[in-house]
Image (tube, rainbow, N blue to C red):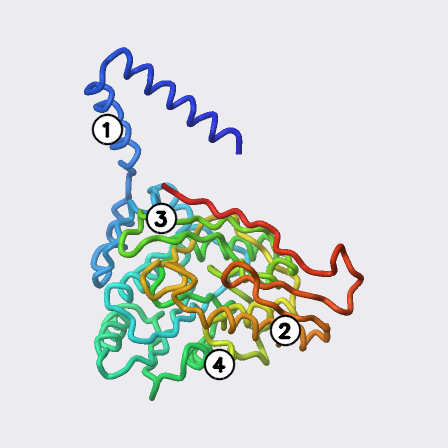
Amino acid sequence: MLRPILVLLHKLKSFIRILKNDGVRESFQVLKSKIVKFFNVRVSKKMRMAWKGRNGFSISPFAFRITDKVYEMQKNEQFPMKIKFSIIVPLYNTPKDFLQDMIGSVLFQTYSNWELCLADGSDSDHGFVEETCKEIAKTDNRIKYKKLECNYGISGNTNECMKMASGDYISLFDHDDILHPSALYETAKAINKEKSELVYTDEAIFKSPNLHSVRHVALKADFSQYLLENCNYVCHFTSFKKSIYDGLMFDSECDGAQDYDIILKLTEKTKNISHVKKCLYYWRACASSTSGSPEAKPYTWEAGKRALEKHFKRIGENALVNLGKKTNTYRIVRHNRKKEGNGTSWVPKMRIESVF
């Protein structure tokens, strides 16, 4: 933590020295040239071809700073366990540009053994969702698309996605978000190294539509059951072994916190959980999303409370779930455990860094 601060101070001192010696105009010319040099990342022809014509996917490879060397290394690496990922995306009236960006970010993954399962509950006014998905699916047989008879809700639509999945691991992905090109590669790497059954990564919240307008970066804690029972800090990007999902379903009573509910269920079945300490998921902040403002969907707080109450009932623990002081946090009063302090479970702090 200290080293980046020292480097920043050194750069600042250098700029002040140049400013004193050369004046304002020359100093900013030097600064401009350094910025241009910083962003002038070499991108391979193969990488450019992979990006080209991605059905309107507008985000440049420069956005992720994936260099020629890194791209080739990740594309060519062979892991002992050749894991197939089923990326689960329930669709409902997804804006076309969001849809194209979401699918494009999957197509550009450096790890290629995946399938994208799309279950579409969109209404008749959003026929372009079906048209766009079918058009892109023609170019890549790893994309599976199913038009649903009606909208079953977020949990019901996700359950329809699960019926389509044939992979070894399931990855949860929202219909308006973006994956870093290395998301599946880093997840596969963690699974191969640690034999993990559940893997989650760090994530960033960006202000739509500009990927560079990052509002927060969530640098998460390693796995803690107590912390998870106080807030869903695991969230995105989560992947889990399909075999530990057997017998489970997404619960419509927890719509709005359905991912929280399923993560709690999975942690009841495995403790082999890994945290990839890299920001590999971009959560889009817009007026209607909880990433833009937790208050945008107030029902998610109550839905999370129901998920926790069901969790404690399943594990046979007598616990009272209260809403926390902050939105989408919870205060747990445990009645059948040895009291620690005042007998309540407190929320440990998680690092949330604002990026200016």
In this rendering, the label closer to the viewer, 1 or 3: 3
Instruction: Kindly state the secondary structure of the residue where label 4 is placed.
Output: helix
In the rendered image, the residue lying farthest to the bottom is: 149
Q: Are marks 2 and 3 in contact (CB under 8 Å)?
A: no
Q: Nearer the viewer, residue 285 or 239?
A: 285
Q: Residue at x 45, y 57 (%)?
A: 184
Separation of disc 2 and disc 4 at Cα? Answer: 15 Å
In this rendering, the label closer to the viewer, 1 or 4: 4
The numbered mark, 1 or 2, whose residue comes first in the sequence reads 1
Looking at the image, residue 347 sits to the left or right of residue 57; the answer is right
Looking at the image, residue 167 sits to the left or right of residue 49; the answer is right
- Which amino acid, by three-letter code, is at mark 1? Lys
Instruction: Kindly state the secondary structure of the residue where label 3 is placed.
Output: strand
Q: Which residue is identified by label 1? A: 32
Q: Which residue is identified by label 2? A: 311
Separation of disc 1 and disc 2 at Cα? Answer: 54 Å
- Which amino acid, by three-letter code, is at mark 4? Ser
In this rendering, the label closer to the viewer, 1 or 2: 2
Q: Are marks 2 and 4 in contact (CB under 8 Å)?
A: no
